[in-house]
Image (spheres, helix red, strand yellow):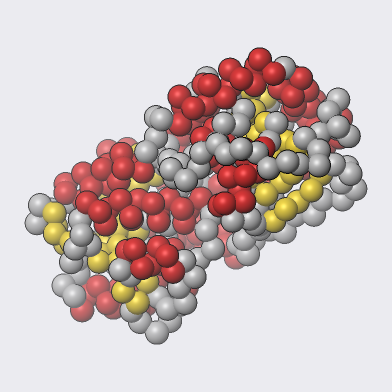
């Protein structure tokens, strides 16, 4: 097992068995950095790996016979106790509720602030699980000062116990020569759930001056934990593309006129940084953690006002000089974040828990 300053650590790598969203990307990239820093780290997962590349790079050890939450609540703690009850690092919002020697990561509390985005089973389970885990964990990781304040305020967690470990952008995300598109397009990337606010951005697009001359492409799939969203009477220029590969996503960022991020609530929000890394101008909601992450590098709008979103679309699409300045500031903003720097924060927390 990994030993740093006398601390033995196992990393919960259940994320290699899950589809990649922001949470899994965070867990994967931080884990890969930790593996490079501590070659003897032990990463364990259930069977059913779907991210084989990451599993191979981490040397993931598959333990137990169950999958999903059952593995995490039964097989994982059994494995840990049979190996001397080492410190467990959880990077993906969950962990075993009967195990005390652990660090838990909670990215945000969207399931509390925006319950309509989630199934009732998910909300009920996560409220109970999160409260127990936060009480048991020796330290808590989260992705922004905004989320730190949210968690502390709602759960009453001691601020000194919470450490901010920001997201970042993989080096693969860089501008390419755009692939020719049939029509110019605005791009949005996220799961289409209530707090992601796509109903308003679609309404805004239909009211905008650019509707009909510029398309609106929306990338992202809906996880089973989220309440299903339906969008009726879509304008002809709106297209939902579903999940795409990173390679396809980089092409889409590189070719977009601008990127739209209308979310009402984010613990961090990786897509705007990915867009900026690919040389795409960003217009974004002025809510939650988004101004903390983007600083002065985005054109902001009120996400509750469809007219304000439409005006932002018209302004950014119609002003090439503004887009150029947003692209320049975006590239500078991306440099504030790195997976290496984030992993170093985690390493310091690990070393402090002797």
Where does residue 312 sit, x and y in percent of width and height? 73, 23
- Vertical arrangement, residue 247 with respect to residue 324, above or below: below
Where does residue 85 sit, x and y in percent of width and height? 19, 69
- Vertical arrangement, residue 283 with respect to residue 118, above or below: above
Residue 266 visible here: no
Compare residues 72 and 300 and report the one nearer the observer.
Answer: 300
Where does residue 153 sit, x and y in percent of width and height? 44, 38
Q: Residue at x 30, y 39 (%)?
A: 341
Left/right of residue 13 with respect to residue 317 in the rendered view: left
* Total count of labels: 0
Q: Quadrant of the N terminus?
A: bottom left
Q: Residue at x 37, y 38 (%)?
A: 338
Residue 52 visible here: yes
Q: Residue furthest left?
A: 6
Instruction: Determine the image quadrant of residue 228.
Output: bottom right
Where does residue 86 sit, x and y in percent of width and height? 19, 66
Q: Residue at x 89, y 44 (%)?
A: 236
- Vertical arrangement, residue 335 with respect to residue 42, above or below: above
Q: Residue at x 31, y 42 (%)?
A: 340
Left/right of residue 82 with respect to residue 57 in the rendered view: left
């Amino acid at each position: 097992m990994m030993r740093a300053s006398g601390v033995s650590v196992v990393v919960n790598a259940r994320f290699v068995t899950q589809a990649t969203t922001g949470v899994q990307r965070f867990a994967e990239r931080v884990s890969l950095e930790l593996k490079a820093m501590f070659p003897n780290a032990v990463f364990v997962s259930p069977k059913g790996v779907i991210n084989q590349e990451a599993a191979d790079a981490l040397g993931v050890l598959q333990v137990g016979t169950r999958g999903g939450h059952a593995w995490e609540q039964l097989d994982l703690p059994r494995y840990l106790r049979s190996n001397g009850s080492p410190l467990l690092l959880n990077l993906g919002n969950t962990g075993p509720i009967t195990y005390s020697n652990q660090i838990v990561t909670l990215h945000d509390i969207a399931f509390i602030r925006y319950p309509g985005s989630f199934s009732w089973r998910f909300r009920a389970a996560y409220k109970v699980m999160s409260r127990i885990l936060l009480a048991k964990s020796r330290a808590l990781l989260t992705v922004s000062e905004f989320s730190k304040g949210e968690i502390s305020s709602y759960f009453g967690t001691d601020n000194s116990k919470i450490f901010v470990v920001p997201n970042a952008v993989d080096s693969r995300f860089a501008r390419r020569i755009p692939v020719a598109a049939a029509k110019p397009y605005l791009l949005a990337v996220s799961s289409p759930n209530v707090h992601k606010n796509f109903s308003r951005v679609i309404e805004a697009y239909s009211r905008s001056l650019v509707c009909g001359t510029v398309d609106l492409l929306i990338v992202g799939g809906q996880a089973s934990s989220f309440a299903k969203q339906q969008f009726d009477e879509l304008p002809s220029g709106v297209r939902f593309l579903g999940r795409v590969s990173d390679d396809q996503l980089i092409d889409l960022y590189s070719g977009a006129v601008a990127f739209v991020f209308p979310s009402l609530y984010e613990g961090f929000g990786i897509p705007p940084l990915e867009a900026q890394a690919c040389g795409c101008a960003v217009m974004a909601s002025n809510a939650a953690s988004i101004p903390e992450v983007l600083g002065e590098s985005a054109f902001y709008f009120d996400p509750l006002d469809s007219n304000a979103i439409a005006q932002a679309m018209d302004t950014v699409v119609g002003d090439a000089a503004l887009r150029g300045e947003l692209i320049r500031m975006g590239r500078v903003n991306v440099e504030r974040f790195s997976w290496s720097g984030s992993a170093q924060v985690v390493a310091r927390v690990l070393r402090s828990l002797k």
